[in-house]
């Protein structure tokens, strides 16, 4: 199979037509801010020729000599048409003008959606900042992470917790990229706010399956977040003032038409109100997004992207928790000719966690640092073949923990847990080939080389096994350390080499429908060490190595896509299997553990389901209905016939298994001044483990818990609503403002984040206590720009 795959990939380099073809290429931008337009349909009238613009707004079409009409369309913009004479290679720059929507009647503009039906990419959702602004959220803050959880196949961890789950995968199996740099924590205040300033985000793309070969390292999904470029023509300022947080954004030219900047900042300040009532506790966050862009000429552009964010918790001045991410990225984009361009990227991503416990005179910090280098090229070999290829390198430094006393009288000994290092390299290539007018295939390979580098101390165990099974007690126990091995950081202690094939196929049934299928094989070499179902700031990242194998996932998907007059329908079924999924022994101690391999077991997981998405994109009323039915399970059998494994070796539900997930999102433009948004969410309750019996031991009542995750919390559902009032909608220059009124959880549903069991102090009975994070949360904010 690999032999034929390589042969097919090689043939693409030589399949160039001998007829006289010319290249018609260019960049599509919008007149509002001169930003590139992603996903615009570019076509040639009365021909099947066409293309869809990429992240830089670029397109390229191969045509024979002759006269043509070039058409460009994108939702919300006027259709563009231009006569062109093709007798040589042409380069055309196109500006799209926004289209004002009539409020007296609904006007449906015909777009060339057949191009998207032909594209083999599936299991992908794109969301713009306008989409995000139409979704109500908690405390009135637009939220990019909460927006994607309203899509099919995506669910949140739990209310008041960060992270998200895609197609039954764990939260650490999602690769989150900010302008191509990795983000290792995606939320503020334990999931109440997302990590990004929404105004600084241009768009985001979520890959749930059919993940392109240029991405690797996570087995569930890729969330690509792209920051906006600053305005090249004029200075703009916009922001908002809310009840608990505010934000401000500056953008404009440094050298008009050549250099632009963008700086955006946010901060919460609810903790200041606590001080007014002499409450010493506080919880707040702040972050800064930056982007600097410089256009040298039509073929060269340089961009710098940056992000810095911190969360701070302080309880009675005796407990202080500070954590956050820092990102820096430089990109040089070079266009060799109409058919080939490249991007060279250099990045740094750093995640820091710090903890101070004054009541025991204790300071602790940990984190991960990721240095990245990528060089990618895109070539259009002919009107039937597009090629994408490149190299990527990442160097990782892991700090599992550093402990020190906070004062001289503390009984704490300073200790640095053994730091870990890894180096990952990848080579990838993919081709999108149009075999017939109806059949298009995207196929590629990614070669991964992950090396665990040497560290100061490596624990050694008898028979190389850090865990032993006590048959008498039927439990796993830590194996004794029989020695240590010292290594140099330049040593390659363990290397994994894996070849990852990817393929996606699209077959267009007619002008309005198509079927698509995809397969992907992905390896994940980084693991989130956590004993909770939802990610928290205290989680520790660890690399694969001598005692931890990389996770390996196969995913298959099949879908049907159809365009109606005012609706789009997307349906997909998927099946995913994952090997070497980590599990933890009962009573595992994960934090400040310098021998984490002593509490880990390797198992497997699987997930399967069906997704349905019905979208309405035109008219006064827009929105979507998303429904997912899925199952997510895990199994950790014993390593030998005498071992019990986890849950007696039986399959059990993962902590994020939610068979039924329904999301309804809608936006209605009442008139030029008023607009309302709403969304409704229903999810099956999260799995949990409840006691099913009790026994008495030495006068104490001891609960006896049943099989792992055999029970569930009550079903989760809520309704959110917001209304936007624009006093002067006709005003397009100078000060422009609007009011945003929102209600999170309109009918005050007390959804259970967890259920704990304990003894009632009054009557001594065992009782279940439900913990809820949010009830009804009204909020208001004033947005402005000038």
Image: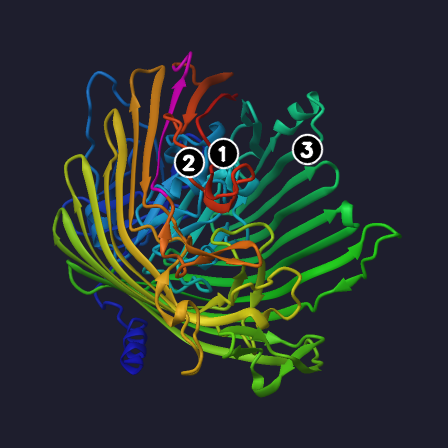
Q: Which mark is residue 129?
A: 2
Q: Secondary structure at mark 3?
A: loop
Residue at image x 43%, y 15%? 731
Q: Earlier in the sequence, mark 2 or mark 1?
A: 2
Q: Which residue is mark 3?
A: 281
State the separation of the CA atoms marked 3 and 2. Answer: 34 Å
Region of the chain picked out in magenta, as a range:
714-729
Q: Which residue is mark 1?
A: 199
Q: Secondary structure at mark 1?
A: helix
Let me know if residue 544 is in the magenta part: no
Horizontal and vertical percent position of residue 138: 46, 31
Could you say which is closer to the camera, residue 712 or residue 389? 712
Q: How is the image coloured?
A: rainbow
State the separation of the CA atoms marked 3 and 1. Answer: 30 Å
Could you say which is closer to the camera, residue 499 or residue 632? 632
The quarter in which the N terminus is drawn is bottom left
Asked if one can make out residue 733 in the rendered structure from this viewpoint, the answer is no
């Amino acid at each position: 199979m690999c032999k034929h795959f390589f042969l097919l990939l090689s043939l693409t380099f030589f399949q160039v037509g001998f007829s006289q073809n010319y290249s018609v290429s260019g960049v599509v931008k919008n007149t509002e801010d001169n930003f590139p337009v992603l996903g615009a349909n570019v076509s040639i009238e009365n021909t099947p020729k066409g293309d869809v613009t990429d992240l830089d707004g670029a397109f390229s079409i191969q045509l024979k000599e002759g006269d043509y009409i070039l058409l460009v369309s994108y939702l919300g913009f006027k259709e563009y048409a231009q006569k062109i004479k093709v007798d040589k290679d042409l380069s055309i720059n196109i500006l799209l003008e926004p289209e004002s929507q009539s409020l007296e009647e609904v006007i449906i503009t015909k777009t060339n959606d057949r191009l998207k039906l032909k594209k083999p990419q599936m299991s992908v959702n794109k969301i713009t900042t306008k989409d995000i602004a139409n979704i109500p959220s908690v405390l009135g803050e637009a939220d990019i992470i909460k927006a994607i959880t309203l899509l099919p196949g995506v669910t949140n961890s739990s209310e008041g917790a960060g992270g998200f789950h895609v197609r039954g995968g764990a939260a650490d199996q999602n690769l989150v990229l900010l302008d191509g740099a990795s983000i290792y924590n995606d939320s503020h205040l334990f999931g109440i706010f997302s990590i990004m300033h929404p105004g600084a985000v241009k768009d985001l793309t979520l890959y749930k399956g059919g993940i392109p070969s240029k991405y690797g390292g996570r087995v569930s999904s890729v969330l690509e977040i792209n920051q906006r470029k600053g305005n090249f023509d004029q200075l703009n300022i916009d922001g908002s003032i809310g009840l608990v947080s505010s934000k401000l954004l500056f953008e404009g030219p440094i050298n008009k038409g050549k250099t632009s900047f963008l700086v955006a900042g946010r901060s919460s300040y609810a903790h200041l109100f606590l001080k007014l009532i002499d409450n010493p506790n506080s919880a707040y966050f702040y972050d800064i997004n930056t982007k600097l862009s410089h256009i040298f000429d039509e073929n060269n552009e340089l961009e710098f992207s940056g992000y810095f964010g911190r969360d701070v918790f302080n309880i009675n001045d005796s407990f202080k928790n500070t954590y956050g991410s820092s990102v820096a990225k430089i990109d040089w984009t070079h266009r060799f000719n109409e058919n080939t361009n490249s991007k060279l990227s250099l990045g740094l991503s750093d995640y820091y966690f710090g903890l101070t416990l004054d009541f025991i005179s204790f300071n602790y910090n940990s984190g991960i640092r990721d240095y990245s280098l990528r060089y990618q090229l895109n070539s259009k070999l002919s009107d039937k073949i597009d090629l994408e290829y490149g190299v990527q390198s990442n160097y990782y430094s892991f700090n599992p923990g550093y402990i020190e006393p906070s004062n001289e009288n503390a009984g704490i000994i300073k200790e640095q847990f053994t730091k870990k290092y890894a180096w990952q390299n990848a080579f990838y290539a993919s081709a999108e080939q149009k075999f017939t007018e109806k059949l298009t295939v995207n196929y590629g390979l990614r070669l991964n080389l992950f090396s665990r580098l040497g560290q100061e101390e490596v624990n050694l165990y008898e028979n190389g096994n850090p865990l032993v099974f006590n048959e008498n007690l039927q439990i796993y126990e830590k194996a004794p350390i029989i020695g240590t091995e010292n290594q140099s950081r330049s040593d390659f202690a363990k290397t994994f080499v894996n070849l990852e094939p990817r393929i996606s196929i699209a077959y267009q049934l007619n002008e309005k429908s198509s079927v698509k299928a995809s397969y992907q094989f992905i390896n994940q070499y980084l693991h989130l060490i956590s004993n909770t179902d939802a990610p928290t700031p205290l989680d520790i990242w660890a690399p694969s190595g001598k005692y931890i194998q990389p996770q390996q996932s196969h995913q298959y998907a099949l879908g049907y896509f159809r365009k109606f007059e005012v609706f789009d329908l997307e349906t997909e079924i998927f099946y995913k299997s994952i090997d070497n999924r980590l599990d933890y022994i009962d009573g595992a101690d994960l934090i400040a553990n310098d021998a984490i391999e002593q509490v880990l077991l390797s198992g497997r997981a699987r997930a399967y389901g069906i997704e349905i998405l019905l979208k309405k994109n035109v008219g006064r009323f827009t929105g979507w209905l998303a429904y997912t039915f899925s199952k997510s399970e895990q199994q950790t059998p014993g390593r030998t016939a005498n071992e019990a494994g986890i849950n007696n070796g039986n399959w059990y539900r993962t902590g994020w298994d939610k068979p039924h997930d329904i999301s309804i999102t809608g936006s209605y433009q009442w008139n030029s001044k008023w607009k309302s948004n709403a969304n409704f969410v229903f999810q099956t309750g999260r799995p949990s483990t409840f006691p099913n019996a009790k026994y008495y031991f030495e006068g104490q009542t001891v609960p006896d818990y049943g099989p792992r995750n055999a029970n569930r919390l009550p079903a989760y559902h809520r309704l959110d609503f917001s209304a936007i009032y624009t006093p002067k909608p006709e005003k397009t220059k100078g000060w422009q403002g609007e009011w945003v009124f929102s209600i999170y959880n309109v009918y005050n549903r007390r959804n259970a984040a967890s259920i704990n069991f304990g003894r009632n102090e009054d009557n001594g009975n065992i009782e279940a206590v439900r913990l809820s994070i949010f009830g009804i949360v009204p909020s208001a904010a004033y947005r402005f720009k000038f």
